[in-house]
Amino acid sequence: MIAPGALACGALCGGGLFLVVRELWPARPDMNAVLDRLENLAPGPGHSQGARARDGEPTRARWERTGEHILAAHGHRLRLPRQDLDLLGRSPGEHIGTKVVGAVLALVIVQLAGLGAALAGFGLTFALPVLGSLVFAAYIWIDADAQVRRKARRARLAARYAIASFLERAQLERGANVGPEAAVQRTAEVGDHWVLARISAALKRAELAGIPQWEALQQLGEQLGIPELEAPAESFSLAGEGASINKTLATQALLLRQRLLTDREAEAHAASERMVVPGTVLFTVVLAMFAYPAFRALTSI
């Protein structure tokens, strides 16, 4: 007679495999999602339109649809790093779908490993694979948000370098007697960095909507969580009123460069401090390996 634990384990594995195969099975792409991607003018870091269309787009669309269904049903119970996702150019549905698929795969993998160990003759209790699968799935679920925050932190750091260059080039444009709005637009269109593409897209939308460009810059800085965009927005608003902002832009660029250099030095010092403990442990182990034979010889006399 088959034990109830083995039946439950097999049912859980079969259900997990069914969900995975159902999500990975090719499906017809949603026309609205395709049109949204074609009209997207503001890609996130490392997510150009061509790369998104070529690199796993059907799988991403399936995960996004799964996440959208979950958000529609339980979105009020889930906390999402929406600002970081917007910065990276990822939709909440895609993020939730990735988390769900990863958690299901974690459940299935651990259960399959436990089933293989049981078939191999290892005496594992029913609770151990279940507990291990739950812990692994919870780790995958939590780590997905942590990865988004880490990527967003790196993207904001890269964006600050691009914004410093943006301020310097805008200062040169203003020095050439170019108007403030034209200086901002031309400076954003010159660069190929993703944050400059977001700035250019925001300026175009502001022009179509009939709102000031510096207001669009300030809204973009608040939306992406990059405060370094808000100070230039205030400076350009003063330029629109007739004030000279060349020195202000130069000062802001210099302060931003100095802040970035200070942050890099702090990261280097932190990395050096983290190496102290492993170095001390390694020195202690090597010293014990060399000292133990001599100590053993002295104590055996």
Image: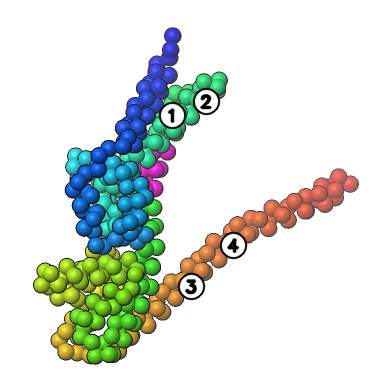
> Which of marks 2 and 4 precedes in the sequence?
2
Numbered disc total? 4
Task: Find numbered disc 3 in the image and state the secondary structure of the residue it sits on.
Answer: helix
Q: In the rendered view, would you say 13 is above or below 185?
A: above
State whether residue 88 appears in this view.
Answer: no
Residue found farthest to the left: 210
> As shown in the figure, which amino acid type bears the numbered disc 4?
Val
Q: Position of residue 214 (x, y in %)?
A: 19, 76
- Disc 1: CA contacts within 10 A as few (<14), some (14-19) or many (>=20): many
Q: Quick one: 167 or 223, which is closer to the camera?
A: 167
Q: Are marks 4 and 1 in contact (CB under 8 Å)?
A: no
Tell me which label, 1 or 2, sits earlier in the chain: 1
Judged by its main secondary structure, the magenta piece is: helix
Residue at 48% across / 73% down in the picture?
A: 265
In primary-sequence order, the first of circles 2 and 3 is: 2
The magenta stretch spans residue 139? yes
Q: Distance between the residues labelled 1 and 2?
A: 10 Å
Q: Label 4: which residue?
A: 276
Q: Residue 117 carries which label?
A: 2
Q: Can residue 169 be seen in this view?
A: yes
**27 or 74, which is in the foreground?**
27
Stretch in magenta? 135-144
Q: Mark 1 = which residue? A: 111
- Badge 2 density bin: few <14, some 14–19, many ≥20, Cα 10 Å: some
In the picture, the disc for residue 279 is: none
Give, as a three-letter code, the residue at label 3.
Glu
Circle number at residue 265: 3
Do tag 4 and tag 2 residues touch (Cβ < 8 Å)? no
Residue beneath the point at 38% across and 68% down:
158
Nearer to us: label 4 or label 2: 2
Q: How crowded is mark 4: few (under 14 residues within 10 Å), some or many (20 or more)?
A: few
